């Protein structure tokens, strides 16, 4: 699930990639064994390419970064958290459409 358009985020780089980011960040909390996570991954990659420079799409593997899942109270996956200025401003749990995702990203601007 690793590709060039999205950024892999973990406990070590979360502060740099998300909290201090000058652009809005959508963080996808996912796991290798999660079917819906695999379904939404190509959509997130597509949006990451289309919106490059205006929004960052990051991915957190919950199996490897349990402290981040706990910190943001992620109880089900996929969970998308929308950050602006280092703060969570929106959240989607489960599948979503590209139209909904783009609408939420536009609202971050």
Image (cartoon, grey):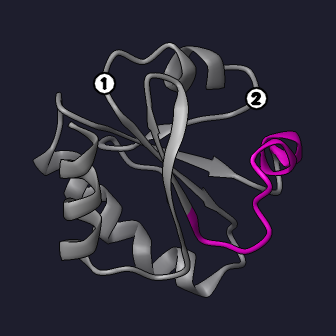
> Vertically, is 6 above or below 1?
above
User: Residue drawn 59% across and 71% down?
Assistant: 78
Between 91 and 13, the one nearer to me in the picture: 91
- Please, which residue is most extreme toward the bottom here? 35
Q: What residue is disc 1 on?
A: 23
Give the side of residue 11 with respect to residue 97, left or right.
right
- Identified at 31% across, 24% down, the residue is 23
* Residue 82 painted magenta: no
Q: Is residue 99 above or below residue 2?
A: below
Spatial CA distance of label 1 from label 2 is 19 Å
Q: Which mark is residue 49?
A: none
Q: Residues within 10 Å of mark 1 (few under 14, many from 20)?
A: some
In this rendered view, identify the residue nearer to me: 24 or 107.
Answer: 107
Image side of residue 101 versus residue 33, left or right: left
For the image, the number of numbered tags is 2
Which residue is painted at 68% across and 69% down in the image?
32
Highlighted magenta segment, given as a residue range: 65-79
Picture quadrant where residue 68 is located: top right
Q: Position of residue 8 (x, y in %)?
A: 54, 38
Quadrant containing the C terminus in the rendered view:
top left
**For discs 1 and 2, the disc positioned in front in the rendered view:** 1
The percent position of residue 22, horizontal first and vertical second, equals: 34, 15
14 to the left or right of 52: right
Q: Earlier in the sequence, mark 1 or mark 2?
A: 2
Q: Position of residue 25 (x, y in %)?
A: 40, 37
Question: Mark 2 = which residue?
Answer: 11
The percent position of residue 105, horizontal first and vertical second, equals 26, 51
Res 36 quadrant in image: bottom right
Q: Is 77 left or right of 24, judged from the image as shown?
A: right
């Amino acid at each position: 699930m690793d590709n060039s358009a999205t950024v892999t985020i973990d406990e070590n780089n979360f502060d740099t990639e998300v909290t201090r980011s000058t652009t809005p960040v959508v963080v996808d909390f996912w796991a290798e064994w999660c079917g819906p996570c695999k379904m939404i991954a190509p959509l997130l990659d597509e949006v990451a390419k289309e919106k490059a420079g205006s929004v960052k799409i990051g991915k957190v593997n919950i199996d490897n970064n349990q402290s981040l899942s706990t910190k943001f109270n992620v109880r089900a996956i996929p969970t998308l958290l929308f950050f602006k200025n280092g703060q969570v401003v929106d959240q989607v749990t489960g599948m979503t459409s590209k139209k909904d995702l783009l609408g939420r990203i536009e609202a971050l601007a």
